[in-house]
Image (cartoon, rainbow, N blue to C red):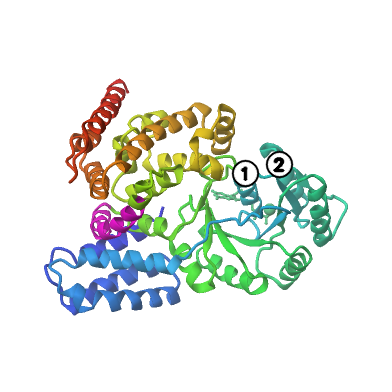
Amino acid sequence: MFESLREGLSSALRSLSGRGKLTEANMREGLGMVESALLEADVSYEAVKAFMKRVSEKACGEEVLKQIDPTQQVVKIVYDELVELMGPVDNDLHLKGSGITTIMMCGLQGSGKTTTTGKLGKRIQVRGRRPMFVAADLQRPAAIKQLETLGEQLNIPVFADYEEKDPVKVCARALEMAKAKNCDVVILDTAGRLHVDEELMAQLVRIDQQCSPDQVYLVVDGMTGQDAVNSAKAFNEALELDGVIMTKLDGDSRAGAAISLKHVTGVPIKFIGTGEQVTSSTSLEDFTPEGMASRILGGGDLQELLRQAQTAFDQNVMEEQEARLKKGIFTFNDFQTMMAQTRRLGSFGKILSFLPGMGNLKQLLGNTDADAEMNKINGIINSMTKEERENPKCISPSRARRIAGGSGVHPQQVLDLIKQFNGMAEMMKMMSGMGAGGRIGAMQELMRRMQQGPAGLANAAGSVAKGNTGKRLTPAEKAKMRKLREKEMKKRKKG
Ligand SMILES: Nc1nc2c(ncn2[C@@H]2O[C@H](COP(=O)(O)OP(=O)(O)OP(=O)(O)O)[C@@H](O)[C@H]2O)c(=O)[nH]1
Ligand SMILES: [Mg+2]
């Protein structure tokens, strides 16, 4: 994904490095290359202009130029400004606690509305809610059938009326039916047109007025580049969108639309769709500006520079974690935060195999692609209810089966993840028994070792046990840590 932009940015930023101190002229020359790379990737001119203005202001400041090697700072500036440009994003679906939540899907023909309706329905269903699809696309005769097939596949009820000609009436009746059928989330799959036209907009506005949807999402095809951005602008003017879902990012789409959409339309991308399958847990992902910016800057050497620049940021996150840990709190939510954080430090697969208690997870998941692994684990956690994430002990085998169904894995993989998590939580609780200095020291030591490769990492837990973390452990604590470590080593040998 986004290879050419990645290469363009990488070579622009590389041209700055290794020169020692830079002059303003050198810096501007390098930034000019960054600008060209963005324009070539089809980022809108307006967005590039605003972005470059902010980047140049920061990068050409004395603070940066007087550095021995300013490239690291420049990469961090580019990253931060990309994040700024694409965010902030709220990935929540805002499902109401009681009553019916109505979600309206709209978009041009073939953008992926119906497929995304399926993916969204699935996402909602695995959260323990009862979604219903509404066939509000009466434009194409086959559209109703397509949605009904999806509903059957996902075991989600579909409201359709083959006789009715007015989609507004279909939607109104569907909401009544949802009440009767005890469904609590209604997703309206509306019709698309080839281009934004008045008739289409008028129809959508009527549905909007009649049903007062809680969320209106626009589905855009990521492969259509700036057309996606322009149609988002038009739809937002008519409907006040709550978010955009960008599909087909699995194809050879350039990054331009994803980068410029928020800036041009004011509406953030909420989710990204990949693949035609609706049942895979990774086919609809949360869009995060941080994740996207890292992907764009994902070339090897840039990643390293970014990592260095982010050490300060990591410190903050770590301090927050430290505060929770101090209270003895370590839940799946903390685990997700930690994963997101550690992912940036290098290959996730590598890190995963060295996290204490996580040794065999990689093999268990049977996947060698780091991103896919991460998504799989995230998918499992995302399929848990709030209660389950906060208190994994309540996950019974039947709940594990539901979670597995939701995330498209084998139930055993859920149980294994919980087992591994428990081992890790135990270790975290151990650390909570240490003094404040010892805890943060232990966390830092773990993080540092995670980056060092097998030799350093295998001893991560051990080094905590040995008290190489600024604070000594009591003999009982040491013995417990040693036991944990031995268990882990044994498992690793077997695996
Ligand atoms: N590769 C890929 N294909 C997708 C994605 N989303 C949808 N598609 C495909 O795009 C085509 C159109 O998808 P639909 O979901 O029918 O699009 P639609 O917006 O409902 O189309 P209309 O109802 O005709 O307006 C289908 O072939 C889908 O399988 C995606 O994220 N990735
Ligand atoms: Mg459709």
Q: Amino acid at mark 2?
A: Ile
Above or below for 187 versus 126: below
Q: Is residue 384 visible?
A: no
The residue at the point 54 percent across, 35 percent down is 408
Our reading of the magenta stretch's main secondary structure is helix
Q: In terms of sequence position, does the residue under pointer 2 or pointer 1 come before the other?
A: 1
Instruction: Find numbered disc 2 in the image and state the secondary structure of the residue it sits on.
Output: loop
Left or right of 112: which side holds 66?
left
Q: Quadrant of the C terminus?
A: top left
Left or right of 441: which side holds 414?
right
Beta carbon at label 1 within 8 Å of ligand 1: no
Does the CB distance between marks 2 and 1 fall below 8 Å?
A: yes
Viewer-side residue, 267 vs 414: 414
Label placed on residue 311 = none
Give the residue pinned by disc 1.
Answer: 122
Above or below for 467 versus 37: above
Viewer-side residue, 258 vs 384: 384
Q: Position of residue 291 (x, y in %)?
A: 40, 55
Left or right of 59: which side holds 20?
left
The residue at the point 82 percent across, 58 percent down is 172
Q: Is residue 205 visible?
A: yes
The magenta segment: 300-321
The residue at the point 46 percent across, 68 percent down is 260
Give yes or no for residue 310 being in the magenta stretch.
Answer: yes
The residue most toward the top is 494
Q: Amino acid at mark 1?
A: Lys
Quarter of the image for residue 292 reads bottom left
Question: What is the distance, in whole Å, between disc 2 and disc 1 at their CAs?
Answer: 8 Å
Give the residue pinned by disc 2.
Answer: 156
Quarter of the image for residue 53 reads bottom left
